[in-house]
Each structure stands twice: as structure tokens, then as C-alpha cells.
């Protein structure tokens, strides 16, 4: 796994080949796939406001409400990290910050 976070919905972990794992207690995990086949290697994960977010290769941020249907929110190859709070996803990049309000997209 490339990243693990604890959120209000429990633990979320992401890895290569579109692997996303979710667990309420850290012991029992359910596996989800992001994308088709080996489309996305995932390097970051966040949750907030009913949205799941993953950071993928090529600086792509994907969002989902149900862990099945994903939409691209933004793309920045210089992305360094992301965090959700106060209704916004803030994505750090080498030279700037992106602020995304998923409800407005």
C-alpha cells in the first residue's frame, strides 16, 4: 500500500493497480478498484463531506461518493499532497495550491 489514512468513515488505504481498501476497525478490510485494469496507481487518499478522494499517477485527483463511480477533479503533475476540510479539498503542488469544492462541480 502507498498511503493509509484514518477518516470519519474509518481507515482507507490505497496502492498500485487501482487498489483501494476500506476498514472500520483496521482488522477487516474490503477491497475496491479505482478505474479499469491497471489504469491508476494510487498515492494518496482522503475523505470528507460524503466524498472519497484518491491521488493517482500523473497528478490526477479522482472523487467518488460510492467507491464505484469516479470523476476526475483536477490534474497537476507537481502534486505533493491533499487534505479535506471545511467543505473543500486542498491540493498542494510544488508551486501552488488548488482549492476544490466538490459540491460545486
Image (spheres, rainbow, N blue to C red):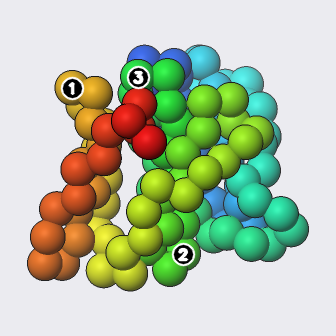
Depth check: give the residue in front, 79 or 27: 79
Q: CA distance from mark 3 to mark 2?
A: 24 Å
- Establish if 16 lies above or below 49: below
Residue 91 coordinates in the image, percent (x, y): 27, 57
Q: Residue at x 55, y 58 (%)?
A: 72
Q: Earlier in the sequence, mark 1 or mark 3?
A: 3
Quadrant of residue 21 in the image? top right
Going by the image, does 63 lie left or right of 48?
Answer: right
Q: Which residue of the protein is positioned furthest toward the right in this rendering?
A: 37
Check whether the beta carbons of the residues at disc 2 and disc 1 lie within 8 A of each other: no
Going by the image, does 55 lie left or right of 96?
Answer: right
- Establish if 61 lies above or below 87: below
Q: Residue at x 76, y 39 (%)?
A: 68
**SS state under label 3:** loop
**Which numbered dot is residue 49?**
3
Q: CA distance from mark 2 to mark 1?
A: 26 Å
Residue 13 coordinates in the image, percent (x, y): 57, 45
Say whether residue 26 is visible: yes
Q: Which residue of the protein is positioned furthest toward the front in this rendering?
A: 104
List the residue tagged with mark 2: 57
Q: Earlier in the sequence, mark 2 or mark 1?
A: 2
Residue 22 coordinates in the image, percent (x, y): 65, 32
How crowded pointer 2 is (Cα within 10 Å; few <14, some 14-19, many 20+) is rated as some
List the residue tagged with mark 1: 86
Amino acid at each position: 500500500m502507498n498511503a493509509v489514512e484514518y477518516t470519519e468513515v474509518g481507515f482507507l488505504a490505497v496502492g498500485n493497480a487501482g487498489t483501494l481498501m476500506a476498514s472500520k476497525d483496521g482488522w477487516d478490510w474490503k477491497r475496491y478498484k479505482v478505474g479499469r485494469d491497471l489504469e491508476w496507481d494510487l498515492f494518496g487518499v482522503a475523505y470528507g463531506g460524503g466524498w472519497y478522494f484518491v491521488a493517482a499517477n500523473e497528478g490526477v485527483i479522482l472523487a467518488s461518493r460510492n467507491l464505484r463511480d469516479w470523476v476526475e477533479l483536477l490534474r497537476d503533475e507537481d502534486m505533493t499532497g491533499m487534505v479535506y476540510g471545511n467543505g473543500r479539498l486542498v491540493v498542494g503542488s510544488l508551486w501552488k495550491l488548488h482549492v476544490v469544492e466538490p459540491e460545486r462541480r
